[in-house]
Image (cartoon, rainbow, N blue to C red):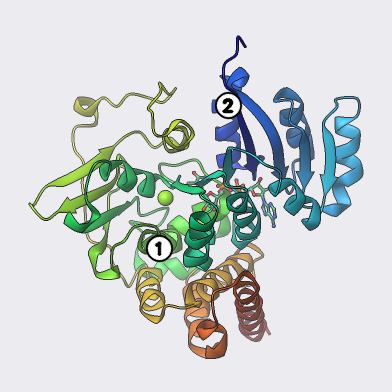
Amino acid sequence: MGGAVTRRVSIFGATGSIGQNTIDLIARDSDAYDVVALTGASHIDRLAQDAKQLKADVAVTADPMRLEDLRAALSGSGVEAAAGHDAMIEAAQRPTDWVMSAIVGAAGLEPGICALEQGATLALANKESLVCAGALMLATAKQHNARLLPVDSEHSAVFQALVGEDIGSVERVILTASGGAFRDWPLEDLAQATLAQASSHPNWDMGQRITIDSASMFNKALELIETREYFEVSPKQIEVLVHPESMIHALVGFNDGALMAHVGPPDMRHAIGYALNWPARRALPVERLDLAAIGALTFRVPDEERWPALRLAREVMERGGLAGAVFNAAKETALDGFIDGHLGFTRMAEVVDEVLNTSDPSHIDAQMTLDNVQAADHMARQVAKNIIEQTAG
Ligand code: NAD
Ligand code: MG
């Protein structure tokens, strides 16, 4: 394209909800991008099809058993096929300018660190990596002159509200929460909530895990910690408001009493596109809100009895160290237990609480290195599994 500068981009977690939305934006303007790596864990056909369409250098599946399928799907295309953990890391170490980090769970941490070590701009949907190892991510970015841009809608909203502002003049950050599937359920019914009920979100179309985490508010719990890690604000300055319409994504309150709200449709392509085009704004194919048609926006204080995850997040922030890694791993394991039918909906928070209270403190107090974060993660998963097995047995 007539000497236009193409940007090298990679998408980790390309087959998921955020990955597909990212591909949607990139495919609309594909001459502007030189796609390096696409990764996924399943959906081999989708991965291969997107890699061919975007002319990626390499497509990687995290599942080593699927290498032959991926090879077959890519044969003759010129796109390299690779599989397994080491191949993911190798792909993440390839130089790029911009990377979408959209793997779900702590599995996104190591590839994200690799991208930062290349000096790339890391668009971070994978909130778990900040929850597990925020200080490590930020230090790695600083050391390699890389940049972290938030993609979580709330954090993108805060980031945008802070453009041109001094963080020292911020009094509070308010994250909004839709309230998820069980916002209006009678409390006594929650223990019986089924997987299908928890997997349906009133406003957002997202991956299954984050959808269930929205119903339990573990998603907002992770986001409280993500806010503390990303922005220089203390836990006391971060509030959560239930906002069922999901139109205001976050608000920033300043010391002069002003509140800057970010208003937009519940479409992740806004936050993804903002991170893709930053620091510029470019036209995006998202709905323009008709506020008169919406009529009213409502807010309420979250009920901590309904959503104990919010209290747990505050305890984790208080504890510091690697408590975030323990919290996230316990949450991921409890969520697996719920998805597999071994654990009731309300038991998830109880399991996470128990893991936090019974974990060997030496893991939480360890220095924040990738190895120690992974060790704390592994330990917490074991403790959580034991608790879940005892419950089931
Ligand atoms: P998803 O389940 O739709 O997709 C997850 C992606 O990660 C897929 O490509 C999957 O193949 C891959 N993956 C899963 N396990 C893996 C593993 N062990 N190793 C390597 N790859 C693996 O999830 P999603 O909804 O797109 O969410 C992705 C991330 O973005 C999460 O951290 C989520 O919290 C965050 N996020 C999502 C949304 C949303 O609207 N979906 C909004 C805000 C933040
Ligand atoms: Mg969010």
Q: Nearer the viewer, residue 292 or 34?
A: 34
Q: Secondary structure at mark 1?
A: helix
Pointer 1 local density, CA inside 10 Å: few below 14, some 14–19, many at least 20: many
Most extreme residue toward the top, as rendered? Answer: 2
58 horizontally vs 313: left or right: right
Say if disc 2 is inside 8 Å of ligand 1: no
Say if disc 1 is inside 8 Å of ligand 1: no
Q: Quadrant of the C terminus?
A: bottom right
In the image, what residue occupies the spot 52% across and 60% down?
137
Residue 145, x across and y down, in percent: 51, 50
The residue that label 2 is drawn on is 26
182 horizontally vs 343: left or right: left
State how far apart marks 1 and 2 are (Cα).
29 Å
For residue 157, what is the image quadrant? top left
Pointer 2 local density, CA inside 10 Å: few below 14, some 14–19, many at least 20: some
Residue 21, x across and y down, in percent: 55, 34
- Work out whether 201 lies above or below 330: above
In the image, what residue occupies the spot 26% across and 61% down?
239
Q: Quadrant of the N terminus?
A: top right
Residue 262, x across and y down, in percent: 27, 40
Residue 200 showing in the rendered view: no
The residue that label 1 is drawn on is 229
Q: Nearer the viewer, residue 118 or 224?
A: 118
- Work out whether 354 lies above or below 224: below
For residue 367, what is the image quadrant? bottom right
In the image, what residue occupies the spot 88% across and 52% down?
65
- Work out whether 217 lies above or below 358: above
| Amino acid type shown at disc 2 | Ile
Q: Secondary structure at mark 2?
A: helix
